[in-house]
Amino acid sequence: MKVFFLLLTTLFSIASPVFAQDDFDPLNLPSATDKPKKQTTEAKLLSEVSAVAPGQPFTVDLKLTHPDGWHSYYVNTGLIGEVLKTKWTLPDGFTATYLGWPTPHLSNSFGYQSIGYEGTVHHLYQITPPKDLAPGTTIEITAEANWQICDDTGCVPEDTTQTLTLSAAAEVQLDASVSDSFAEARAHYPNSSKDLSIEATETNSVITLTVTPAGSLDPEKVHFFDEDGQVSVQEPHEASKEGDALILKLPRNQGNDFADAGPVLEELTGILTDGNTSYLVKTNFQEPEIVKAPVSISSLLPILGGMFLGGLILNLMPCVFPVIGIKIMGFVDQAGHDRKKIMLHGIAFAAGVFASFWLLTLIMLLGGIKNWGGQLENPYVMFTLIIVMLLLAMNMYGVFEIGVGATGVGSNLTRKEGLGGSFFSGVLATVVATPCSAPFLGAALGAAVALPTFWFIVAFTAMAAGLSLPYLTLSAFPDLVKALPRPGAWMESFKQGMSFLLFATVGYLLWVYSAQVFEQDYGQKGLFVMIGLSLVAAAGWVWGRWTTPIRKPKVKWIGRGITALLFIIGIILAKPGAESDASEAVVIEWQKWSKEKEQELLAKGTPVYVDFTAKWCLTCQVNKKNAYTQEVVDLMQRQGVVFMKADKTTTNEEIDAELTRLERSAIPVNVLYTPGDKTPHITPEVLTPSFMKKFVNEKLGELPSQAFTPESFEEAQASQEPVLVNFRADW
């Protein structure tokens, strides 16, 4: 209602000259002609010089004096409105440059804050003559300007055409009569901030502006007016002093009832002022410094212990455990049963493991994985994680196998004699263990992400130590190899059990992903995500069943083709939808259906459209996505239709009884009830926009559009029918 009142009063004020005419009083209100006319803005173009010189810039002032209570706008209005625009007509070779916006202040319009100027405002321009200007030449400079002024009753567009006539001379001649006016004008302009250190950072949609030194700026009165609309005008700016610095917290402009959210730029530009001192601000956004609490032993030990245990458990994976004894006996054979040499081989093997983990850690640090929490805000990152974790979980459960071929990677290096071969055996052990390590690496990342860089590296070193420990222990005591349990079916059971950790991870990621994308496509995206993930899982099953080595080549190629088809379709369905402008979203205000409410509306002469639906009804969801376009919804709203939803997601006896009365046993069922007509108008099951428009027009009659004229308005008033008149302008 605030937005409606804002627009209606604004547009009525534009039409006020028409209403003020003696021969036009459609409302027959005596005060319509008695209301005093608004005074217009007084505009004047002043030159700081009386004579200009070749190539010497000079300043002119477009001075605007507004009527009491009215204001014009800053470059960022903060609300709606038109800002000053100036068109210059200059002699050949002359150029005009705007010197920037004077310091604005907050104004209040219709209960909202805007940014602008009241009283007198000076707009300064620099005019530069050509260097070959001949002295004695008469110069004529014309400015055509238009702007808008507003008060609490509405807004009015204004314009002016101002001309200056000057002469050219060998030297610039200042005009003393306007020196005070130009001094006043410059006092309203912000100072340069070159002597200040100004930094801008952003965290959780709050922009922090740090100004050093704060100087005389009063934190209780300071305000920042940005040029681009990145900062919210309707929310307060919180300022404080920390030592010699001024800290200003600026909520980002997330949009409101009548305006979209502001842009997200790399630079912040505007004017910082406390009413007495103003500075021009232009600074790039900096990455916020992440201050981490000191790491305590009590918090560090569980993380390191968990990482070590995770590495140790990796040795129980089917792709790792069977080779432990073989590797140790290989060390024994190479060392000729010399215990010292056997130990050196074990250390070389462990060195390969540690080097591999350190390389993995470096890759993660360079790739920004330490900021994983921030990356999880991106739905595409979440989607990728879900797909990867789902496939790894299926692999661990045994639906298909990956990583088997890794045992052949670098086999020549591992067969080398000596310590070099043992080192590369450690590298290979890490590579082979990687497909089995996802449950533990996921938990490790979650714990280690909050650690400083040094301890982040130490945490993964602990995991490497866990993986290496059996090899080091058995190298020191080779006879213990005989005590190792024999490989068997228990290892496959263990691996399958570990897969449920990954399935749980998929569930968690899907929960986060649901908050990011499930409301896309008019609330139907969640259904397509579930279908898409099912197809991806089916692709993994086909791969595991039809591409094994025992299959014939033709069968394997068919299996690969089906796998690719299922996977691609699944990805298309489940991936995040394209982000659309919030202003483009179709909004339908559905009321909860009840027979009593339906009959009450019909008795008042209001048509009712009832959608019998459920979350589990696929056709219902497709109808909502495809049929209810903005054009359809606008048409139904103009017809006065009330939208009601009868939701059968859970059992509802009243809805079931109504469907029985309508002789329908399944949904979707969509019904239009019209006043005075007891016949329910039921649509087909599948809806399209073209059908809906034709259906509504047939049942309720087409609404002719009517242009506003004084005669049509008076005719409508005489009929005592309600009339909505939309006075509007493109600006």
Image (spheres, grey):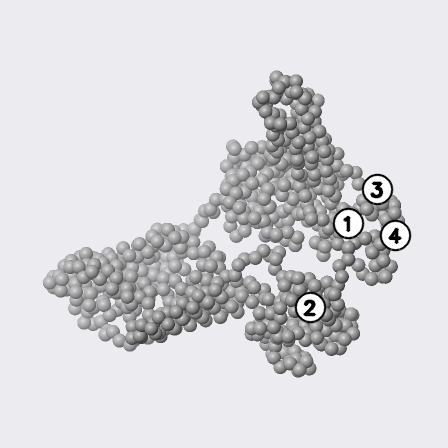
Q: Which structural element holds mark 3?
A: loop
Instruction: Judge whether 546 appears above or below 273 on screen.
Output: below
- Label located before the other in sequence (4 or 1): 1
Q: Distance between the residues labelled 2 and 4?
A: 40 Å
Instruction: Judge whether 107 appears above or below 325 on screen.
Output: above
Please name the residue shown 29% across and 67% down the image: 404
Q: Which disc is residue 694 wearing?
A: 2
Comparing marks 2 and 4, which lies closer to the viewer?
2
Which residue bears the numbered disc 4?
A: 28
The reply, left or right, for residue 103 in relation to residue 546 is right
Circles 2, 4 touching at the beta carbon (< 8 Å)? no
Q: Which structural element holds mark 4?
A: loop
- Label located before the other in sequence (3 or 2): 3
Q: Distance between the residues labelled 3 and 2?
A: 50 Å
Q: What residue type is labelled 2?
A: Lys
How packed mark 1 is, by other alpha carbons closer than 10 Å (few <14, some 14-19, many 20 or more), is many
- Label located before the other in sequence (2 or 4): 4
Q: Distance between the residues labelled 1 and 2?
A: 35 Å
The residue closer to the viewer here, 49 or 425, is 49
Quarter of the image where one finds residue 470: bottom left
Circles 3, 4 touching at the beta carbon (< 8 Å)? no
Q: Which structural element holds mark 2?
A: helix
Which residue bears the numbered disc 3?
A: 36
Comparing marks 3 and 2, which lies closer to the viewer?
2
Q: What residue type is labelled 4?
A: Asn
The reply, left or right, for residue 393 in relation to residue 575 is left
x, y (%) of residue 634?
Answer: 68, 62
Q: How far apart are marks 4 and 1 (CA)?
A: 16 Å
Residue 633 appears in the picture as rendered: yes
